[in-house]
Image (cartoon, rainbow, N blue to C red):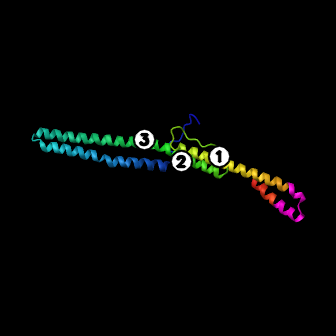
Amino acid sequence: MPGYKRGIFLINKKFQFRFSMYVCSWLVAVSFVYPVIIYNLIEFANRLTTSPAATATLQSLKVEMLWLLILFQVSLILLTFLISIFISHRIAGPIYKLSKAFGAVTRGELNDELQFRAKDHFRDVADDFNIMVRGLRQNIEKSSDAILTAIAKLEKIAPTAAPAAQAEIEATLAVLREARD
């Protein structure tokens, strides 16, 4: 699927928002450290000064720096949230496709190969899934060949069998023909 782009960005909203909130919550927790450090540094410098003009300047600087820091932190958290959504898209998309592929296998559809986009995560899982499906197809083909061989042998011996055995052979043939389909 070269050039394939997924049109829906929020594939699994619950997972993607939970993932993004988890990442952002760590950033929020860590971001409380910066204002405390700046506040304490300015307070320390304030205690060292004896000039009322310098104290007023430091107080003004402290308020400005804290507001700038708050604005920066809010911007950083929003940017982190958007990046987290983008990263989670590369995780949720393959999981969604894998889930759909499991459904197809459950319905007996073993024809399609599972492929993820070049930048998606879990491409090795798609490769393993495709190997599994090929193995299932081979096992089904072997079983189908064995059933066809058994049907041919039973059809060959049915006319020569005793009448009581013929009924049993015909019943077995019916079961085998049904299994083949």
Find residue 37 and name its label. Answer: none
> Does 146 appear above or below 89?
below
Query: Which amino acid is tagged 3?
Result: Ile
Give the residue at mark 3.
Answer: 83
Q: Secondary structure at mark 3?
A: helix
Q: In the visual, does 89 lie left or right of 53?
A: right
Query: Which residue is pictured at 86% across the width and 54% down the height?
Result: 156
Q: Earlier in the sequence, mark 3 or mark 1?
A: 3
Q: In the visual, does 167 lie left or right of 72?
A: right
Question: Is residue 181 at least partly visible in the picture?
Answer: no
Give the residue at mark 1.
Answer: 134
The image position of residue 145, as x and y in percent, is: 75, 50
Q: Earlier in the sequence, mark 2 or mark 3?
A: 3
The image position of residue 46, as x and y in percent, is: 15, 43
Q: In the visual, does 180 lie left or right of 127?
A: right
Query: Which amino acid is tagged 2?
Result: Ile
Q: Earlier in the sequence, mark 2 or mark 1?
A: 2
> Does 162 appear above or below 86?
below
Q: Which residues are magenta?
A: 156-171
Quadrant containing the N terminus is top right
Q: Residue furthest top?
A: 3
Q: In the visual, does 31 lie left or right of 55?
A: right
Give the residue at mark 2.
Answer: 95
> Does 159 appear above or below 86?
below
**How many angstroms separate mark 3 from mark 1 (CA)?**
37 Å
Query: Which residue is pictured at 55% across the width and 47% down the height?
Result: 96
Discs 2/1, front:
1
